[in-house]
Amino acid sequence: MAKMKTMYECLACGYETPKWLGKCPNCGAWNQMEEQIAPTVLSQNSISVTTSGNHQNGKAYKLNQIPTQIEKRLSTKFDEFDRVLGGGVVPGSLVLIGGDPGIGKSTLLLQVSVQLANHEQTVLYVSGEESLSQIKLRAERLELHGDDFYLLSETDLAVIAHEISVIKPDVVIIDSIQTMSVPDNQGTVGSVSQLRGATSVLMRAAKDNQIAIFIVGHVTKEGNIAGPRMLEHMVDSVLYFEGERHNRFRILRAVKNRFGSTNEIGVFEMQDRGLKEVVNPSELFLEERLSGSTGSTVVAALEGTRTILAEIQSLMTPTVYGNAKRTASGIEYQRVSLLLAVMEKHCGLLVQNQDAFFKTTGGVRLDEPAIDLAIAVSIASSYWNRETRVDDVFMGEIGLTGEIRRVSQIEDRLKEANKLGFKRAFIPYNNLKGLNDLALQLEIIPVKTIQNAIRLIFPK
Ligand code: TYD
Ligand code: MG
């Protein structure tokens, strides 16, 4: 028989080591090392939820013996929410919704639950954070009424599993996973071993009974769902609900999705009666844009399957003393510092003694190469204090030699810009082919290099 190896695991972060340690080398927590014990697993296995007898009993099947299931999705009647999921809620899926505390996760899921309940789904909303009357109060404030909508205020997964067996819901919400506990589990509530235990119980409940389960997860300062990435690996889909607290926009973003594409976003606005969908986000993101300003450009960026127009702002000012200050919000810092270097090398800007600040408006996060050209033009505009035209839109990736490289889905980007009334679009020269048939009221200006683009935009 193989010798059993004892392993120790940090209850705070999940770090594993063959030796007991007082302090975890990974997260620095003291006295959190626990011997990994088999009963943890046993107790998780002892909680079972059976509503349909769908369990496959560990038997293997040939591919052609498995009946094809027609993909049936439940619509939440929130188009933005359905799109992020890849076209609706998939029965039997386990979805993690992460986000900062107070961003609106509970509000969103309460609204979604009631919508589903009003469309013939049985929904169970489990809260480990709020009492039944608190949730009721919120539902009343949001003017939500649902028939097949059950509320449970509970943190013990054994009790929750029992309720699921009794109610046989189609959709379950667990708010939040950090408050849930599996009986007999050694870890404290919210620890890695509890999170893992609770998530695996829910995973099995979802798969065996074809229940769609949404779990809410709080996010740490660093932007990770508290507890290590392990939670993200266990679930089918991970959605992040983001936004600045002072800003009314909220963006739901898929970062992992077994049933759809990632990077898909849904845009919502927090109002006093809950979250409202934003049907045309580009309009909102550009709403407060000033005409005749310096350092501002508009990019047609791809977010999942959708094009969104957003404003990029740069502010370059001479450094007063010490090292130059650089910050970027909504754009990767890496990307802007690379573009600053390209502009210095190829367009004659002297940026080393300049403070540089970058921002996207509306709290939208842009992360794709096609935003390079818009950033570079906004840098030049702010540096030379020259206005950009309010009806120009930019798309193009910039290489290290200053060349402008082709971007994907140029037609969709141009159509969106055209719809919003832009007059000129600067695009990569290599994207030009086949664009003649588009019939847009948009002057298309192809550019090969950043020098070339700058000369056209800011003529001497
Ligand atoms: P909540 O859903 O409790 O956030 P989370 O579950 O992510 O912690 O949202 C709380 C915030 O939303 C709170 O600061 C108040 C605000 N809010 C509104 O502005 N309008 C509303 O209708 C509701 C219900 C909440
Ligand atoms: Mg909440």
Image (cartoon, grey):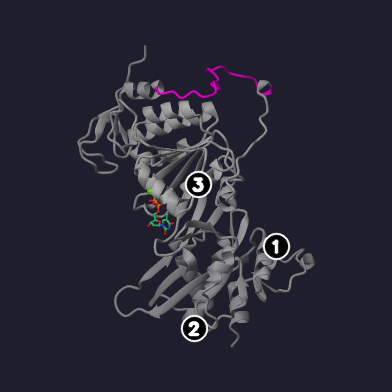
Q: Nearer the viewer, residue 44 or 424?
A: 44
User: In the image, what residue occupies the spot 45% across and 55% down?
Assistant: 242
- Label 2 CB-ligand 1 distance < 8 A: no
Kind of residue at disc 2:
Trp
Q: Residue furthest top?
A: 1
- Label 3 CB-ligand 1 distance < 8 A: no
Q: Secondary structure at mark 2?
A: helix
Alpha-carbon distance for marks 1 and 2? 32 Å
Q: Are marks 1 and 2 in contact (CB under 8 Å)?
A: no
The mark nearer the N terminus, 1 or 3, is: 3
On the image, the x and y values in percent for residue 206 come to 50, 31
In the rendered view, does 333 fall on the left or right side of 4? Answer: right
In the rendered view, does 208 fall on the left or right side of 75? Answer: left
Q: Which residue is mark 2?
A: 384
Circle 3 residues within 10 Å: few <14, some 14–19, many ≥20: some
Q: Is residue 322 visible?
A: yes
Alpha-carbon distance for marks 1 and 3? 43 Å
Between label 2 and label 3, give the one nearer the viewer: 3
Q: Which residue is mark 1?
A: 411
Check the image and report above or below for 121 versus 222.
Answer: above
Is 53 a magenta residue? yes
Between label 1 and label 2, give the one nearer the viewer: 1
Q: Which residue is mark 3?
A: 145
Q: Residue 369: name its quadrant.
A: bottom right
Kind of residue at disc 3:
His
Q: Looking at the figure, which quarter contains the C terminus?
A: bottom right
